[in-house]
Image: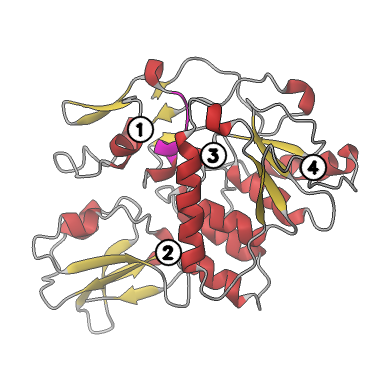
């Protein structure tokens, strides 16, 4: 595993204000999870296109990580469909904290490079880390308004992530046709005082401590920060897991929020040209696509949207062009559908 210059690891991304000079988490490349080496270089190039500093390049058909060029904008992590690029941040812990904070002072999410006196500050990676599905989950599970501190972002080496944040939030708005309440607000220089601190520092960190204890107990964290008590196999990727975790936090009758999260799962359809060859199922890195036999003993394809990362390898390697993958699960996040 290639790692950027040594950094002091953060405990679940949480730091007290006295540790504002704490170094940020490093980006790591887990080459074993990269999709490109599959069957002689899969066509995935999302991380290459996302990096403005050329810290990720192709070397003999494989992704190479150049730590000396990396400014840790974290955009590569947010676009990788198979968690080959990671940082030591427990985003599931952040969801729990946002969810449990009801009626108290708002949580302020802040990069470690931005000075802040907020007693409820939660240190997060650069905003490029937060993909559109993660931002959607944060918005709908939060128990009250929370703030993203973007003061200083425009002058940062990673200022390009501000435009990406706007694009991703616009994507959420387009998918939010049922008008789920979105609770994210921005903290800017012009609006540096919108927060009323009605809850003390001790009570806020007491809540976080409870969740830290939960995450450090006998059930250890999975890659992506989720507990391994979730009933998915080792090949599952962080975004589908996180979306499932978020769905468990929503009230059963919150149809608008559920509809928004369902929009980030995937649906796969197959045309009559499918001949049930093993190419697509053999390429699927998460086990979302499998060949099964029905009651009559006939082979069919089975697709589980809750395991699909949307990498697109199944469609790329279908020699009949019979498969169509699109984002959006109709009504359920975990359907097992026979598609051919």
Q: Secondary structure at mark 2?
A: loop
Cα gap from disc 1 to disc 3, whole angstroms: 14 Å
Residue 302 location in percent, x, y? 30, 70
Task: Please give the residue where the numbered disc 1 appears in the rendered image.
Answer: 51
Task: Please give the residue where the numbered disc 3 appears in the rendered image.
Answer: 127
At label 3, counting other C-alpha atoms closer than 10 Å, the crowd grade (few under 14, some 14-19, many 20 or more) is: many
Task: Please give the residue where the numbered disc 2 appears in the rendered image.
Answer: 265
The residue stretch that appears in magenta? 71-77
First in sequence, mark 4 or 2: give its number.
4
Residue at the outermost front position: 190
Task: Please give the residue where the numbered disc 4 appears in the rendered image.
Answer: 193
Q: Residue at x 39, y 37 (%)?
A: 76
Picture quadrant of residue 306:
bottom left
Q: Residue at x 56, y 71 (%)?
A: 258
Cα gap from disc 3 to disc 4, whole angstroms: 21 Å
* Lateral position of residue 339 relative to residue 247, left or right: left
Examine the rendered structure and indicate whether residue 102 appears above or below residue 161.
Answer: below
First in sequence, mark 3 or 4: give its number.
3
Q: Residue at x 64, y 34 (%)?
A: 151
At label 4, counting other C-alpha atoms closer than 10 Å, the crowd grade (few under 14, some 14-19, many 20 or more) is: few
First in sequence, mark 4 or 1: give its number.
1
Residue 171 location in percent, x, y? 45, 59
The quadrant the C terminus occupies is bottom left
Q: Secondary structure at mark 3?
A: helix
Q: Secondary structure at mark 1?
A: loop
4 vs 2, front mark = 4
């Amino acid at each position: 595993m290639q790692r950027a210059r040594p950094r002091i690891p953060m405990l679940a991304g949480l730091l007290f204000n006295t540790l504002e000079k704490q170094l940020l988490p490093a980006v790591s490349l887990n080459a074993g999870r990269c999709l490109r080496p599959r069957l002689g270089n899969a066509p995935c190039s999302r991380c290459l296109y996302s990096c403005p500093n050329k810290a990720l390049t192709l070397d003999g058909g494989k992704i190479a990580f150049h730590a000396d060029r990396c400014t840790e904008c974290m955009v590569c992590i947010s676009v990788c469909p198979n968690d080959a690029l990671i940082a030591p941040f427990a985003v599931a812990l952040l969801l729990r904290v946002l969810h449990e904070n009801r009626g108290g002072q708002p949580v302020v999410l802040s990069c470690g490079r931005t000075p802040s006196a907020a007693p409820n500050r939660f240190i997060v990676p650069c905003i490029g880390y937060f993909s559109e599905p993660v931002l959607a989950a944060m918005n709908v599970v939060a128990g009250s308004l929370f703030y993203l501190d973007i003061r200083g972002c425009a002058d940062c080496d990673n200022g390009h992530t501000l435009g990406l944040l706007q694009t991703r939030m616009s994507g959420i708005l387009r998918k939010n046709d049922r008008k789920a309440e979105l609770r994210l607000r921005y903290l800017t220089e012009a609006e540096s005082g919108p927060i009323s601190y009605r809850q003390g520092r001790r009570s806020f960190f007491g809540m976080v401590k409870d969740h830290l204890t939960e995450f450090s107990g006998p059930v250890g964290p999975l890659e992506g920060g989720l507990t391994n008590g979730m009933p998915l196999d080792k090949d599952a990727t962080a975004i589908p897991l996180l979306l499932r975790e978020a769905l468990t936090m929503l009230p059963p009758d919150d149809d608008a929020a559920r509809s928004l999260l369902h929009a980030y799962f995937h649906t796969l359809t197959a045309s009559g040209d499918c001949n049930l060859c093993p190419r697509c199922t053999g390429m699927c890195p998460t086990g979302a696509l499998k060949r099964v036999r029905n009651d009559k003993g006939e082979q069919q394809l089975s697709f589980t949207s809750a395991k699909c990362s949307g990498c697109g390898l199944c469609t790329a390697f279908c020699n009949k062009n019979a498969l169509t993958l699109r984002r959006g699960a109709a009504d359920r996040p975990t359907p097992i559908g026979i598609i051919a």
